[in-house]
Image (cartoon, helix red, strand yellow):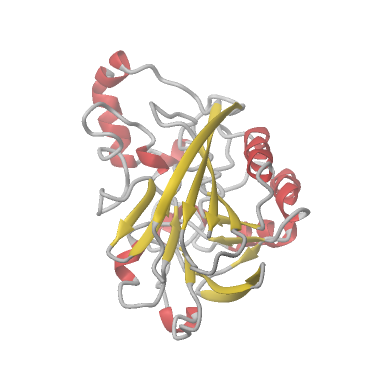
Amino acid sequence: MRPAPVASRTETFDGEAGGQYPDASMMSRRQFLATLGAGGVAAVVPLSLDRTAEKTRRVVTLWNDGGPPVIIAHLSDLHSSRTISLRHIRRCFELALEDAPDFACLTGDFVNAVAPDPVGYVEALRLLTRRIPVYACLGNHDGGRWLAQRGGPDSPDAVVEILSAAGVTVLADETREIHQHGRSFFLTGVQDLWSAEIDPRRAGFCREQAPRIVLAHNPDTKDALRNEPWELMLSGHTHGGQIRVPYYGGRLTAPVRDDRYIEGLLPWGERLLHISRGVGSLWGLRINCPPEVTTLRLV
């Protein structure tokens, strides 16, 4: 049965983003909205570092059996860097664990090309993995074709090593069958759309006996998987636009072709996408677009 959104609720907490020194190699997002219109937007909308994250709770109907919910913590775009501290990331993990999720899904962009403190990052990730299973897909900033074109690593191996050392299961065109509360469903993680070729057959899309949740960093991946069987896609990549201005929201800065899918729980035909605004950001900066930690209750 296809899922349908039912309800959502939001809470906030005070966090800490760390230093204020941007990663010089990452000036993109349409060249930072032409440097914020040469300062015009900044004059109207106050700038803010990532000091507050919102907790969002959403409900997705995936079964119709009246059983207990399966609870997923969805976090994305951690972007560990000189501007996004491990303290901020740990606080977001703690926020996610408050709702006692059954497992967590992390949808890519763990770094801005290189982790400043790999050992510390492993310990931060273990806050999750010591408590619950954690599954992940990779993003365009983690290594691969897109990043290599910009002078970064041509392979995500360094990020995968950090995740694996922390006990995170990385799904790169791979499927796991999950059994939780007497139910079964498939969890499929695919390659980042900009970084590598997605291989649906190798990913395991040929199996259709149960509902399928897809981890795909870029929400535009939905079009590449149009003909494959899945009900719910978890994505990030957009940061909710990161910079939201009146009338346009985040559409001016979100790095996607289909700017209908920038944040939130949204229908796509008979399927659903959940796009997280993410935990971190580029340049340690957001405007009217706070970081997000989401709990999804699959009922």
Residue drawn at (44%, 55%) of the image: 235
For the N terminus, the quadrant is: bottom left
Q: Nearer the viewer, residue 19 or 64?
A: 64
Q: x, y (%) of residue 36? A: 29, 26
Residue drawn at (32%, 43%) of the image: 254
Q: x, y (%) of residue 86? A: 66, 37
Q: x, y (%) of residue 144? A: 47, 62
Q: Is residue 219 above or below residue 127?
A: below
Q: x, y (%) of residue 195? A: 42, 63
Q: How many marks?
A: 0
166 left or right of 50 in image: right
30 left or right of 186 in image: left
115 left or right of 233 in image: right
Name the residue at the left extreme. Answer: 247
Q: Is residue 63 above or below residue 228?
A: above
Residue drawn at (69%, 46%) of the image: 121
219 left or right of 90 in image: left
Q: Nearer the viewer, residue 98 or 124?
A: 98
Q: Nearer the viewer, residue 275 or 203?
A: 275
Name the residue at the top extreme. Answer: 43
Name the residue at the right extreme. Answer: 130
